[in-house]
């Protein structure tokens, strides 16, 4: 009996140690992530995205709903969206930022004479409390979208803030999103190189490359199928852990040729803006810093117009990194020239942290 109890104690100690290690690993990941997002170059890159900035400015700056309201800006960066809200007549703007860029945001707010309206709060939104006894806010503004919509896990922070602080009649900007999938032609990944490098087998590198989803610029002329909606979000009702989902897709081929991969992109909407502002990261739309996310297939598909590529897309937050997203893609293609069944797993990292 004593031996069994001792074994149980060892198991409990082991589980406790594992839990502590996970917490330490996540803290290190957060520190690294927020250090990277403290770099001015990253925020300069975001501010140069004219599609992004124009949509937020039009949705906020001339919106009467902002007048005399209390606004929470989740992940404020340099504070530009907070200043849009202040210019729209908000009485109070709480700009929350965990990265050290918050120090620049504070100076920018002062330099533009918004210090009486905007209060910059450094910290994770999950860890802070609102000042001056504020219990609820009227509006949440957040640039929460990552590559393939969910990379970076910022949506979870927004939903946390929504559940804790948004009033029952409050608004979120932006508040709708749709994730789409399509087939594309593109480059064959030149991964055969890794089989023989100066006489050595480096195929382990090939396997690593094959498992990475690629964020790159895709053009409209690469599209080989109609698009398929795989995920739709309403941020007023969306539950936590939205990145975990499973979707069936059918991609009807639009022309003859080769399909080298699947591309994911998203649209975002501001339904509470005066003119229902929206923008798209489609390959056919103007460029944004999000580009598109490509899942290169291990076997290119010879396709003809009218054929259908069917499959399942499963995604979830990474178990190894709190800011990565994992995908499983099953493809079933029964074409006139070739029938293929493919199962591949991918990991998508936030490309801005790799700059």
Image (spheres, rainbow, N blue to C red):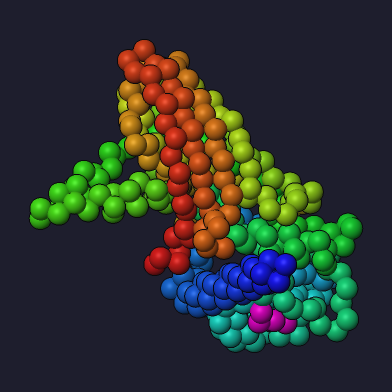
Instruction: Identify the image quadrant of the C terminus.
Output: bottom left
Rendered position, 247 above or below 280: above
Q: Judge whether residue 249 can be spotted in this image.
A: yes
Q: Predominant secondary structure in magenta? A: strand
Q: Is residue 106 left or right of residue 25?
A: right
Indicate yes or no whether the magenta region holds residue 120.
yes
Q: Can you give x and y, in whole percent of width and height, for residue 159 in the image? A: 73, 59
Q: Can you give x and y, in whole percent of width and height, for residue 122 in the image? A: 66, 82
Identify which residue is drawn at 88% across, 81% down.
133
Q: Residue furthest top?
A: 336
* Residue situated in front as seen by the camera: 60 or 255: 255
Identify which residue is drawn at 77% across, 69% down.
71
Instruction: Identify the image quadrant of the N terminus.
Output: bottom right
Q: Range of the magenta residues?
A: 119-123
Identify which residue is drawn at 69% across, 45% down.
233
* Residue situated in front as seen by the camera: 63 or 143: 143
Q: Judge whether residue 60 can be spotted in this image.
A: no
Q: Can you give x and y, in whole percent of width and height, for residue 161 in the image? A: 76, 65
């Amino acid at each position: 009996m004593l031996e069994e109890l001792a074994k149980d104690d060892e198991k409990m100690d082991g589980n406790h140690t594992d839990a502590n290690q996970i917490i330490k690993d996540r803290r290190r990941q957060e520190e690294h992530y927020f250090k990277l997002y403290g770099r001015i170059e990253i925020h300069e890159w975001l501010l140069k995205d004219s599609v992004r900035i124009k949509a937020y400015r039009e949705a906020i700056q001339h919106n009467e709903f902002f007048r005399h309201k209390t606004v929470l800006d989740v992940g404020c960066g340099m504070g530009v969206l907070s200043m849009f809200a202040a210019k729209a007549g908000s009485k109070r703007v709480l700009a929350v930022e965990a990265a050290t860029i918050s120090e620049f945001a504070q100076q920018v707010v002062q330099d533009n004479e918004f210090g009486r309206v905007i209060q910059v709060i450094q910290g994770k939104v999950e860890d802070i409390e609102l000042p001056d006894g504020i219990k609820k806010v009227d509006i949440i503004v957040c640039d929460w979208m990552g590559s393939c919509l969910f990379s970076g896990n910022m949506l979870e922070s927004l939903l946390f803030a929504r559940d804790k602080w948004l009033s029952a009649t409050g608004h979120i900007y932006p508040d709708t999103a749709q994730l789409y999938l399509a087939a594309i032609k593109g480059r064959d990944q030149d991964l055969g190189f890794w089989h023989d490098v100066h006489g050595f087998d480096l195929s382990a590198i090939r396997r690593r490359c094959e498992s990475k989803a690629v964020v790159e610029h895709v053009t409209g002329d690469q599209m080989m199928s109609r698009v398929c909606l795989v995920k739709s979000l309403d941020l007023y009702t969306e539950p936590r852990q939205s990145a975990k989902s499973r979707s069936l897709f059918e991609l009807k081929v639009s022309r003859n040729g080769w399909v080298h991969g699947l591309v994911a992109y998203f649209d975002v909407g501001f339904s509470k803006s005066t003119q229902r502002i929206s923008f798209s990261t489609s390959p056919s739309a103007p460029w944004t810093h999000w580009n598109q996310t490509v899942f290169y297939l291990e076997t290119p598909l010879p396709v003809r117009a009218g054929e259908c590529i069917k499959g399942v897309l499963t995604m979830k937050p990474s178990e190894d990194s709190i800011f990565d997203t994992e995908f499983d893609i099953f493809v079933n293609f029964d074409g006139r020239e070739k029938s293929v069944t493919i199962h591949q797993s991918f990991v998508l990292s936030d490309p801005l942290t790799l700059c």
